[in-house]
């Protein structure tokens, strides 16, 4: 097994490869050392996971709720979620595709900046995770945390977000075993400068 050094080309990092290495080079990331020194250009304070009733305008928060409606005219998408305390609208513009697993009844964990529209909270271009209706959702992450915001361009769009600790959903039928997919189904929306 070979080891990576700071001067090793970035394409040899597991999961990168030549195509992603070319895209990362457009941001000046050509070696492992360049990646290690690629710091966020700013940080945003995320309020942690809140009940929908507790959302206030301008706060960057995470909410969890069940999808009640999915609509909108392509390429826009409007999803309404409920958590028992209220409703929140998730809205995307210029969405390149309509995710097939974002349907009524699934549970969504969404993060983004809260805005008020017609007196109701909404999150525009949120980052989301979708879980099946039978997923057992463990405790909520309540503590605030800082999220690094990285520069991006047309080729590379990403936000490095710390993983949700203790958020490992499991199907209820497999109470003791590993679980449902917890990968985001929507493209991560950048906070580009």
Image (spheres, grey):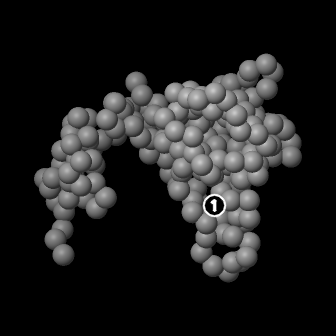
Left or right: where 38 falls relative to 130: left
Relative to 123, residue 165 above or below = below
Residue 188: x percent and y percent?
48, 41
Q: How many marks?
A: 1
Q: Is residue 30 left or right of residue 164?
A: left
- At 57% from the left and 63% from the top, the residue drawn is 181
Q: In which quarter of the image is the N terminus?
A: bottom left
**Residue that appears at 61% across and 70% down:** 179
Looking at the image, residue 57 lies above or below residue 31: above
Whole-percent x, y for residue 131 in the image: 65, 57
Q: Residue furthest front?
A: 74
> What residue is disc 1 on?
167
Q: Is 14 or 79 nearer to us in this picture?
A: 79
| Relative depth, front residue between 19 and 190 | 19
Depth check, front residue: 18 or 73 = 73
Furthest toward the left, the residue is 7
**Which residue is the extreme one toward the top?**
118
Query: Along the line of sight, which residue is nearer the eye, 117 or 73?
Result: 73
Residue at point 52% right, 27% down?
94
- Confirm whether residue 34 shows in the render: no
- Mark 1 lies on a secondary structure that is loop
Q: Residues within 10 Å of mark 1 (few under 14, many from 20)?
A: some
**Residue 106 x/y as whole percent:** 72, 53
Q: Is residue 162 in view?
A: yes
Quarter-of-image position of residue 158: top left
Identified at 57% across, 40% down, the residue is: 98
- Quadrant into which the C terminus falls: top left
The percent coordinates of residue 11 (x first, y second) are: 20, 54
- Residue 91: name its quadrant: top right
């Amino acid at each position: 097994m070979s080891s990576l050094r700071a001067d090793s080309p970035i394409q040899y990092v597991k999961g990168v490869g030549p195509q992603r290495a070319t895209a990362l080079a457009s941001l000046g990331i050509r070696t492992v050392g360049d990646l290690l020194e690629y710091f966020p250009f700013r940080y945003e304070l995320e309020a942690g996971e809140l009940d929908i009733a507790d959302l206030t305008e301008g706060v960057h928060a995470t909410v969890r709720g069940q999808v009640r409606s999915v609509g909108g005219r392509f390429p826009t998408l409007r999803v309404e979620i409920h958590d028992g305390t209220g409703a929140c609208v998730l809205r995307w513009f210029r969405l390149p595709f309509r995710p097939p697993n974002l349907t009524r009844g699934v549970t969504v964990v969404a993060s983004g900046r809260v805005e008020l529209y017609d007196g109701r909270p909404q999150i525009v271009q949120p980052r989301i995770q979708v879980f099946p209706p039978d997923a057992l959702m463990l405790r909520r992450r309540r503590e605030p945390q800082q999220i690094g915001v990285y520069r991006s361009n047309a080729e590379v769009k990403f936000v490095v977000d710390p993983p949700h600790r203790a958020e490992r959903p499991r199907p209820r039928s497999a109470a003791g075993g590993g679980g449902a997919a917890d990968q985001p189904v929507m493209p991560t929306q950048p906070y580009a400068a």
